[in-house]
Amino acid sequence: MDNSREESFDVVVVGGGSAGLAGALTLVRARRSVLVIDSGSPRNAPAAHMHGYLGLDGRSPAELLARGRAEVEAYGGRIRPGTAVAADRLPDGSFRVRCGDGSTVRAGRLLVATGLVDELPPVPGLGARWGRDVLHCPYCHGWEVRDQPLAVLADGPIAVHQAQLWRHWSERTTLLAHTWPLGEEDRELLAALGIRIVEGEVTGLVVEDDRLTGASLADGGVVEFRALVVAPRFTARSGVLASLGLPTADMTRDGHVIGTCVESDPATGATALRGVWVAGNVTAPLEKVAGAAAQGAQAAAALNADLIEAETRRAVEAHRAGTGRAGAVAGSAVAAVAGSATGAADRTVRG
């Protein structure tokens, strides 16, 4: 990379996961100059397969991203390995993105799809099994462990809900009480569903021949199962957005904070700062791969509409300056070209 020269693009996409690549693909097909800055650390990297993506069920997440990168590059998009660490808004409304290697790049608009980090409960061994047989989403992994003995780790308020949900895939579901005090109502619900409760703090996992077989308890006991369900804390990777003054918001469930996200317009991904869009898990932590990709494409369409409106406005101003015609004609021209959809996009991005 030539750090002595600052390149400029219509759009810089920060994040090369499914949301970022889907957005980039939409934009390059819209004839935009696009750079994707990809740190190479997708959230689902530990998983060998992805599920629920129509037409691609069971494929490797790494294969999906490789195909996505190739598609973006086939239309002239650029993929740059690296980490965007911050961004600055410039006086003309464009952005300068600063990377970890000291280089910078300019962008007319930003699409940030940096995802999130799953912060696991502090039990030794969880990280090594994460995405394999330590799980959290039944729609991603439930079929693969159906009818097997499962356990749910109760270290927070959604454990009972998780046990209730996962029991649909396996009636052999156990709740490990661990560090969460269960109320009488919770115990009654679990009993009604036939979900066994095991008291005692979990101190580690039992793994044999690279397969999870259970967990050890503080009292020396062992509980046997084949998959463990946990509730990670979803923490948005929001460094670039924070540098632009866009804070994270708490994500709550039943009054309990389960993570953070960056708020945006649900239809377009527009943030409170004009010129910046978000897509995927950084703004929608519970979204799966297919949903994140859809968000990336939707945000890209809204972003392109905003660029078209800005370009039209400049063209009309130049036309007026050259012909001396009245501003009323210019206003009607902008409305005709931009259309109602573009107008809606503009209303959502004015921060």
Image (cartoon, rainbow, N blue to C red):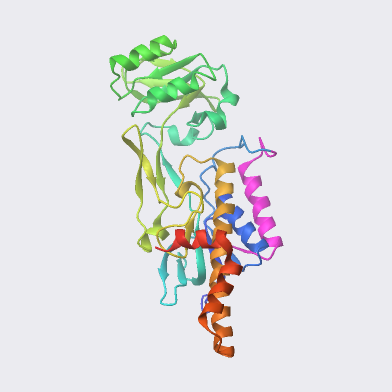
Q: Residue at x 42, y 64 (%)?
A: 350
Marks counted in the figure total 0
* Residue 169 visible in rendering: yes
Residue 256 locus on image (x, y percent): 32, 34
Q: Residue at x 61, y 53 (%)?
A: 22
- Judge whether 330 appears above or below 299 on screen: below
Residue that appears at 39% across and 21% down? 216
Residue 67 falls within the magenta-colored stretch:
yes
The image quadrant where one finds the C terminus is bottom left
User: In the image, 181: left or right of 140?
Assistant: left
Picture coordinates of residue 269 (x, y %)? Answer: 49, 54
* x 68%, y 51%: residue: 67
In magenta stretch: residue 126: no
- State the residue in front, 53 or 346: 346
169 or 175: nearer the viewer: 169
User: In this rendering, is residue 306 above or below 197?
Assistant: below
Which range of residues does the magenta coloring cover?
55-81
296 over 95 or under it: above or below: above
Residue 346, horizontal then vertical, whole percent: 49, 63
Q: Nearer the viewer, residue 266 or 143?
A: 266
Q: Quadrant of the rendered structure where residue 260 is?
A: top left
In what quadrant of the picture does the N terminus appear? bottom right
Whether residue 82 is visible: no
